[in-house]
Amino acid sequence: MDNDEFWQLIDSARAATTPAVPFERALVDVLAERPEPELLRYQACFDRLHHALYRWDVWAAAYLIGGGCSDDAFMDFRAGVISEGRAWYEKVLAEPDVIAEHPAAAGENRFDAEEVFFNEAVNYAASYAFERRTGDRNAFHPAYLRHRAEQGIAPVGPVERDAGMGEPFDFDDDAEMHLRLPRLAAAYLLD
């Protein structure tokens, strides 16, 4: 699946989102209409885009918005960035401090951004859709591993995962955070 196809699915889910149907449920609904091989291709594309956000500066943005950010929470944050659509994804990928302009961060309650950007269920949308299609809760993971092997997609180990993260820095150093993410730091670091 190429990026255009992937983002069309995200856009379809965003268009189907209502107060009664949150994005993550709409995404599962959209994906469940697709054949199983397409769900595997969706997941491979999701993983690639999700991994591209695995950087120190993006993690620092998540840390500011969440008032801290564990490994698991950072996984959820990256899924939330994807759930906001291609335009926001590309903006955050280019400059994470742009999140300060997002309506959830720039509004009256800047802590709305935490609810928007930390979206764990988006990580598992393809597996939920696969389960809905097959009726088998345990079918997705083995099918996805076979798909990755068939496509020559190597697993990402810790060395490869950490290689493209950029320069690490101390998220608890307020001066450093103000230097690297000035708009988010101004909004979230309250003295």
Image: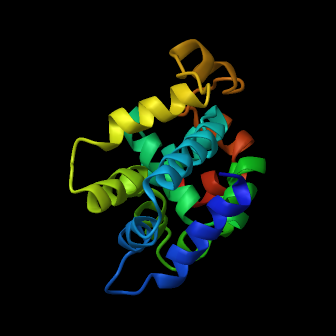
Query: Hey, which residue is sitting farthest bottom in the picture?
Result: 19
* Residue plotted at (50% across, 35% down): 147
Name the image quarter holding residue 27. Answer: bottom left
State the image coordinates of residue 40 (x, y, percent, origin top left).
49, 46
In the image, taking residue 183 as reference, residue 81 lies left or right, namely left
State the image coordinates of residue 23 (x, y, percent, origin top left).
43, 72
State the image coordinates of residue 64 (x, y, percent, origin top left).
52, 48
Query: Hey, which residue is sitting farthest top in the picture?
Result: 159
In the image, residue 36 sits, relative to residue 13, either above or below, namely: above
In the image, taking residue 176 as reference, residue 72 lies left or right, namely left
- Nearest the camera: 137 or 183? 137
> Is residue 89 visible to us here?
yes
* Residue plotted at (63% across, 45% down): 49
> Is residue 190 visible to us here?
no
> So how many labels did they put on this image?
0
In the image, taking residue 171 as reference, residue 180 lies left or right, namely right
Name the image quarter holding residue 175. Answer: top right
* Residue plotted at (35% across, 50% down): 127
State the image coordinates of residue 14 (x, y, percent, origin top left).
53, 76
